[in-house]
Amino acid sequence: MDEYQEAYLKRFCEVCPILEKHFASIDEQRISHLVHFFLAVKEAALYESWNFDQQQDHLTRLRAQLRQAAESLSKIHHGVLREVELNLTLPLEVLNGTYDRKTCAEEVFERAPSFAEVDVAKQVFRGLISFAENIDKAIKYTQDELPVGIATGNRNIDAWKVVEAAVEVSRRYPDKMNVPKKMNGSGPLRRLLVDLFDLYNINANVDAAFNGWAKHIDRNRESLDLLPID
């Protein structure tokens, strides 16, 4: 089991008793499916939440840096670049000077990158040399077509993600969990959100988070400028 799977299982085990508590009449198997659904929705919720101007600035800097990198790579002798590629196979502890490659223990080399990881890094070098113009033009094209997305500003996007996931879960069982048009200090969904905010360590007013999400996202989806780029 890798780190992602371990983290997912841990979160599943934390969310499960909360949903069991608030959807008490639902059987165990459906609760399990509901937890998976909640986690999937939360992971994907508000995917296009970014600061448009900041993203444009980052892309502009990325274009300039990659053009400079491509120019520098084109001037490096093939033999020298080959040596860089060979050194990619060394463990990071050797590359950063923690260990001497000639004297360190054999187990240090057991932490060396895999063949696949090294090959990906080599392809980055080769791609920047042979595909530089395409990369540059692809970034510029993205800049020209980039949707505004969901403006972040001072909004608590983490809270909104939990709200969206909880609402989508609740909408699957409208007879058990009503989704109000406005939240005002009470109700079963509010109690669910209180527990979920506590689990995710979200320091936000539950009513304000729900009402903000409902106003700016749920009732405004058709007017949002989102991906994909047409």
Image (cartoon, rainbow, N blue to C red):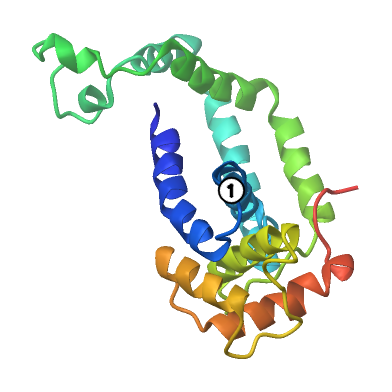
Residue 82's spot in the image, x, y percent?
44, 11
Residue at 41% in and 64% down:
199
Horizontal side of 101 relative to 161 (left or right) equals: left
Any part of residue 155 in sight:
no
Name the residue that disc number 1 marks: 27
SS at badge 1: loop
| Residue closest to the eye, 47 or 201 | 201
| Residue closest to the eye, 213 or 102 | 213
| Residue closest to the eye, 198 or 157 | 198
* Quadrant placement of the N terminus: top left
Q: Is residue 108 above or below residue 132?
A: above
Residue at 66% in and 85% down:
183
The outermost residue toward the bottom is 184
Residue 98's spot in the image, x, y percent?
14, 29
Horizontal side of 26 relative to 172 (left or right) equals: left
Q: Is residue 176 above or below residue 91?
A: below
